[in-house]
Image (tube, rainbow, N blue to C red):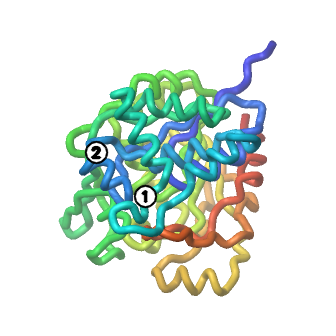
Amino acid sequence: MSKKPKIVIIGGGTGAFVVLSGLKNAPVDLVAIISMMDSGGSNRVLRDEFGLLPTSDIRQCLVALAEDSGDQEILRQLFTYRFHQGVGISGMTFGNLFMAALADIYKNQVKAVEVVQRLLHTKGKILPVTLDDVQLVARYENGYQVIGEHSIDEPKHDGRMKIVEIETIPQAKIYAVAKKEILSADLIIIGPGDLYTSLVPNLIVKGIPEAIRKSRAKRVLILNLMTKYGQTYGFKASDFVSVVEKYLGVGMIDDVLINKSQKTSLKILRRYKEEQAEPVKDDLEGKFPFRVIRANIVSGEEVKKIAGDNLKRSMLRHDPQKLAKEILKLI
C-alpha cells in the first residue's frame, strides 16, 4: 500500500478553512498548523478570563475537516453556532465554549483539541503553531507601534501606513509536533489569509522558518484576492511575496498561486472600496526564483454576515474545490 502524500497548511482563519474544506476528501494526509495570536472577539474572553490560548482558528479548521454526515453534521452546526442574544455570551461560539470546557476537564488544551477531532471524525490533524501565550507587536513606517492582533487587524490608527516589522512578545517557540509534521511534509501551503495576522505570525515563531527551509517539501504561497486596510493597503502581488520572503527567506517559495479572474460584482467592489480595499493586482512579470501559477480560484458566492459576529469578515473568498484542484496538481 503506497503512502499518501502529506500536505501541511500553515495559516489561520478563513483561509485555512477554505483550503481544508476543498482538500478533506482528497487522497492525502492533511495537517493544519494554525496561528495562535488572535486577540479579538471571543478569543479575547478566552485569553483574559479563562487563561487559554485562542481557539477560533482551530475551531474553524475542525469544522472544515469534520465528516459531513450523521451526528458529525449536527456537531458541525453546533461548533459554528454563534450566540447573538444576552449580554455576557453574545458573540461567543458554542465551539469555543465547548473547547474551553474540555480544556478545563483535561487540564490540557491540546488534549481538548484531540478529543474534539475524535468527536467530529476529522479527516486530518490540527495543531497549534506554538503553545506559548504571546501577543503580536507591529511597528509601522513612522515608528508607531501597536500591540495585539485585533488592534492590527482593525486599526484605530491610519491603516494606510505600512507595517515594517512584526514580532511576538515574548518570543514564541515552535510546537514540537508541528515541527515534526513540517519536516515530513510533501507539500507545504502558506495562505491564503490576512498577511500580518494569519500568515506572518506563523513565520516569526522560532523554529518555523528553519523547519520549512529544512523540509524537502514543495513550498506554495497562495495569494489573497483583496488588499486590506490596516495591513496590505495598496499592495500588489509582488508585495505579498516580498513580505513572506522577508521572514521565510528568498528562494524558499517554489510556486505562487494567484487568481487570474476577478469578475467581481460591482456591489461587492463598492463595499470593499468603502473599506479602502481593492483586488490584488498581478504584477508578477519577469524572472523569479519561483513559478507563477494563474488560475480561476475565486468563489462566485457572496459571504453573508452571521448574527452575533461583530468582527469584520471578507466578503469574497477562494473557491474550495477550485483551490483543491490546483493544489493537487502540484503533488
Depth order, front residue of 20/261: 20
Q: Residues within 10 Å of mark 2 (few under 14, many from 20)?
A: some
Q: Which mark is residue 108?
A: none
Looking at this view, name the residue that lies furthest to the right: 1
Whole-percent x and y of residue 117? 57, 33
Q: Amino acid at mark 2?
A: Phe
Whole-percent x and y of residue 290? 60, 45
The residue to which callout 2 is attached is 50
Q: Secondary structure at mark 2?
A: loop
Q: Which mark is residue 92?
A: 1
Residue at image location 55% in from the left, 49% down from the top: 60
Is 179 left or right of 300, judged from the image as shown? Answer: left
Q: Amino acid at mark 1?
A: Met
> Looking at the rendering, in which quadrant would you find the C terminus?
top right
Depth order, front residue of 24/232: 24
CA distance for labels 2 and 1: 13 Å
Residue 215 in sight here: yes
Q: Secondary structure at mark 1?
A: loop
Whole-percent x and y of residue 100? 39, 41
